[in-house]
């Protein structure tokens, strides 16, 4: 695997941490689902993806890298609990969901540090408390509602281009980095990747990072997109003020009086100039 193919598995493990972080503050909204099972699946994906990177970077040096206690624990979880169900596996107890998320962060950083010579220098770990499935369950987002939100944010979404067919070209879609194994060098020019946005800023960042990784694997590039933390903080503040909902849909004033109230709030918080 090349460096960006490996980066894909780092991102997949990172998204497991994102899911754990989301559960830290949204357990109540998700109390109707089997959270124990969901957490177990989050951890399974995390350890499997993390060990993919370690195995590919150090195919013959597992004993050496396992001298590090954190790496040893990562392999222990993968080998004893998730790849197999060994009788001698000892389950670690956690007091809170935050402890699980913090441990996963530490472990993923250790993987990145251990494998840094094999990974892209552009790669960053941009954690966001978000999970696509959990978010939609917690906020009651149906398929119909999601379509309404995306159509509102992107008015031309789904509309056919007015460019004449003779000036267009059809590509096959490169859906997954693993598909590169079945595409020859001569066939790569027949494929293209799709960069998509999400239902909110956190999901958009996840989608864009996944998309640029696929672009890099397909075309031998080194593109990267990282989160603008100050902009994310602004959006979170607007959500707290009620100016944006959880899907980043804007609040629409109900009348002139309400409009003045909204303007006053935005000025007070520094979003509008006096």
Image (spheres, grey):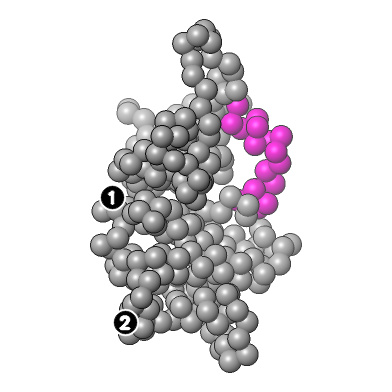
Q: Residue furthest right?
A: 32
| Residue occupied by mark 1 | 122
Residue 167, relative to residue 98: is it above or below? above
Image quarter in which the N terminus is found: bottom left
Q: Position of residue 141 (x, y in %)?
A: 67, 43
| Residue drawn at (61%, 71%) of the image | 40
Residue 41, relative to residue 180: is it above or below? below
Q: Give the range drawn in magenta.
A: 135-151
Q: Position of residue 75 (x, y in %)?
A: 46, 78
Q: Position of residue 153 (x, y in %)?
A: 54, 28
| Residue drawn at (45%, 34%) of the image | 187
Residue 224 falls in image quadrant: top left
- Depth check: give the residue in front, 190 or 107: 190
The secondary structure type at the circle numbered 1 is loop
| Residue occupied by mark 2 | 64
Q: Distance between the residues labelled 1 and 2?
A: 27 Å
Side (left or right) of 229 relative to 202: left
Residue 73, relative to residue 56: is it above or below? below
Side (left or right) of 211 relative to 39: left
Residue 107, numbered circle: none
**Magenta-colored stretch includes residue 9:** no
Visible in this render: residue 22?
A: yes
Tell me the mark number nearer the camera, choosing from 1 and 2.
Answer: 2
Q: Where is residue 78 in the image (x, y as percent from the top left)?
A: 52, 75
- Depth check: give the residue in front, 155 or 81: 81
Image quarter in which the C terminus is found: top left
Side (left or right) of 5 relative to 113: right
Closer to the chain start, of discs 1 and 2, is 2
Q: Count up the numbered dots.
A: 2
Classify mark 2: residues with Cα within 10 Å, few (<14), some (14-19) or many (20+).
Answer: few
């Amino acid at each position: 695997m090349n460096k960006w193919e490996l980066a894909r598995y780092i991102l997949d493990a990172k998204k497991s941490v994102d899911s754990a972080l989301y559960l830290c503050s949204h357990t109540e909204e998700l109390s109707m689902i089997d959270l124990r099972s969901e957490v177990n699946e989050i951890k399974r994906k995390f350890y499997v993806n993390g060990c993919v990177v370690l195995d590919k970077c150090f195919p013959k040096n597992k004993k050496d890298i396992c001298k590090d206690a954190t790496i040893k624990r990562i392999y222990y979880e993968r080998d004893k609990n998730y790849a197999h169900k060994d009788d001698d596996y000892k389950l670690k107890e956690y007091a809170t969901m935050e402890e699980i998320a913090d441990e996963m962060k530490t472990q993923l950083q250790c993987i990145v540090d251990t494998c840094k010579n094999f990974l892209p220098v552009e790669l960053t770990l941009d954690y966001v408390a978000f999970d696509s499935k959990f978010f939609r369950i917690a906020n009651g987002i149906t398929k119909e509602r999601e379509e309404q939100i995306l159509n509102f944010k992107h008015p031309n979404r789904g509309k056919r281009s007015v460019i004449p067919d003779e000036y267009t070209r059809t590509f096959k879609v490169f859906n997954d980095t693993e598909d590169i194994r079945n595409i020859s060098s001569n066939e790569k020019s027949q494929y293209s990747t799709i960069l998509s946005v999400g239902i909110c800023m956190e999901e958009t960042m996840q989608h864009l990072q996944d998309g640029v990784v696929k672009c890099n694997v397909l075309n031998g590039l080194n593109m990267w997109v990282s989160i603008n933390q100050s902009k994310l903080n602004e959006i979170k503040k607007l959500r707290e003020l009620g100016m944006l909902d959880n899907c980043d849909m804007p609040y629409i004033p109900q009348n002139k009086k309400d409009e003045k109230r909204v303007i006053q709030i935005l000025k007070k918080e520094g979003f509008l100039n006096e």
